[in-house]
């Protein structure tokens, strides 16, 4: 049976205090895809619909400027996992469940 090794995961975190005049922030790392980010403003998780990302410029741009003094935080988890294995994940879960029953 093939074994999936644990992935090396490295968190990347960007934090800044908004000045009320800026909607776009250079986060200092490649955001890759929106779905891989956790974005908060003053601790409130922001929906994907209120910001966009630019993977070339490493920026996040909000639809409206965060207010002066609000904490903007962007977090992602990079991994070296081979995405090839992800398509087989349901199979591996089934094999694991059967193995645990025996």
Image: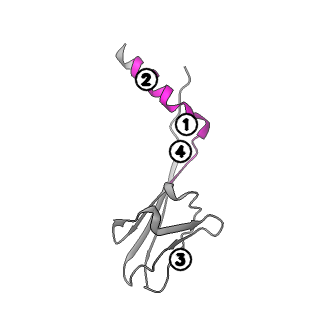
- Residue 56's disc is none
Magenta part, dominant SS:
helix
Q: Residue at x 52, y 59 (%)?
A: 34
Q: Earlier in the sequence, mark 4 or mark 3?
A: 4
- Residue 47 point in image, percent of width and height: 41, 63
Q: Magenta residues, as a range?
A: 77-99
Q: Are marks 4 and 1 in contact (CB under 8 Å)?
A: no
Q: Earlier in the sequence, mark 1 or mark 2?
A: 1
Secondary structure beneath disc 2? helix
Residue 87 among those drawn in magenta: yes
* Spatial separation of the CA atoms under disc 4 and disc 1: 15 Å
Q: Which residue is mark 2?
A: 96
Q: Single out the mark in the foreground, 4 or 1.
A: 1
Q: Earlier in the sequence, mark 3 or mark 1?
A: 3
Q: Is residue 101 above or below residue 78?
A: above
Determine the image quadrant of residue 59.
Answer: bottom right
Q: Residue at x 53, y 45 (%)?
A: 8
- Residue 38 point in image, percent of width and height: 43, 60
* Spatial separation of the CA atoms under disc 4 and disc 3: 30 Å
Q: Residues within 10 Å of mark 1 (few under 14, many from 20)?
A: few
- Residue 7 point in image, percent of width and height: 52, 41
Residue 65 among those drawn in magenta: no
Q: Which residue is mark 1?
A: 86
Q: Which residue is mark 3?
A: 24
Secondary structure beneath disc 4? loop
Q: Single out the mark in the foreground, 4 or 2.
A: 2
Q: Residues within 10 Å of mark 2 (few under 14, many from 20)?
A: few
Q: Which residue is mark 4?
A: 8
Q: Single out the mark in the foreground, 4 or 3.
A: 3
Which sits in the foreground, 54 or 3? 54
């Amino acid at each position: 049976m093939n074994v999936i090794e644990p992935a090396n995961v490295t968190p990347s975190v960007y934090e800044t205090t908004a000045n009320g005049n800026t909607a776009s922030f250079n986060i200092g790392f490649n955001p890759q895809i929106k779905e891989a980010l956790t974005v908060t403003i003053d601790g409130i998780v922001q929906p994907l619909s209120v910001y966009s990302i630019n993977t070339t410029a490493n920026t996040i741009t909000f639809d409206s400027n965060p207010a002066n003094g609000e904490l903007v935080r962007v977090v992602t988890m990079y991994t070296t996992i081979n995405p090839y294995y992800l398509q087989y994940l349901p199979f591996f879960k089934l094999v694991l469940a059967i193995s645990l029953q025996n």
